[in-house]
Image (cartoon, helix red, strand yellow):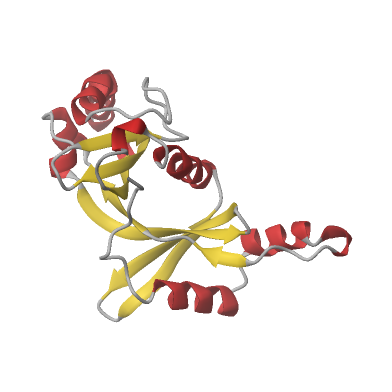
Amino acid sequence: MPIQFSPKAPKTATKVISDHLGDTPNYFVTEAVRSASAGGATPPQISLSQGWQEYAVGLEDLAKGKLLAAAKPGHWRYLVMLGNQPTAEMVLAQESAGERVIASHRGEVMVGMAKGLKVAADLKETADQPYEVRFLLVPALYFTALWLHGAHGVDWLMPIEPDPSPLPNYKPHTEAQVIEALKGRVKAAQAFGTKAAK
């Protein structure tokens, strides 16, 4: 069964991001279009991917063995596509006055998420049940993963670049496997924090 995207994503995302790109030319998108237009070629059409929400977990929660249950929802992320190639990632915040773009970037996380989505679409682990795409990060450890959330109680975590954990990127892992793999880095981060506080 194909991976799914949250129905809770902002309905105005396409307009907000399109307006933002129209009002504030984006360097990454502009450069990609210029490169694709080299030699007079017609550049591919610009489009926007569906959105996924980011979730963050604090070091203290992870040290207590809590990961997904402690994940706090945050902003929404979208890929700006030039043809079938990602050219920028836009971060959208939901505020009382409405949605607005608060960041855009192009880097390892954008590349990692684009690759992760392609891998996730063909996983045998997700073939029989629907899974919602989410983005999980543990800022203190620089851990980044594509979180495939199953409404039936099963979740898979796929580390993506630039994750530095010992877990192999683009391979599905259970929550328990991720918590176990991160134990050493959690202890090291806590020790470093204790020394820095003295």
Horizontal placement of 197 versus 135: left or right?
Answer: left
Residue at the right extreme? Answer: 39
Q: Position of residue 185 (x, y in %)?
A: 29, 22
Q: Position of residue 46 (x, y in %)?
A: 61, 66
Task: Please tell me which residue lies in front, 122 or 142.
Answer: 122
Residue at screen point 22% across, 38% down: 155
Write down the quadrant of residue 158 in the picture. Answer: top left
1 in relation to 62, above or below: below
121 in relation to 46, above or below: above
Q: How many marks?
A: 0
151 in relation to 119, above or below: below
Q: Position of residue 91 (x, y in %)?
A: 42, 61
Residue at screen point 29% across, 81% down: 97
Q: Is residue 134 visible?
A: yes
- The quadrant of the rendering that contains the C terminus is top left
Horizontal placement of 89 versus 66: left or right?
Answer: right
Task: Please tell me which residue lies in front, 141 or 155.
Answer: 155
- The quadrant of the rendering that contains the N terminus is top left
Q: Position of residue 60 (x, y in %)?
A: 16, 35
Write down the quadrant of residue 145 in the picture. Answer: top left
Residue at screen point 42% across, 32% down: 163
Residue at screen point 25% across, 78% down: 96
Q: Is residue 141 visible?
A: no
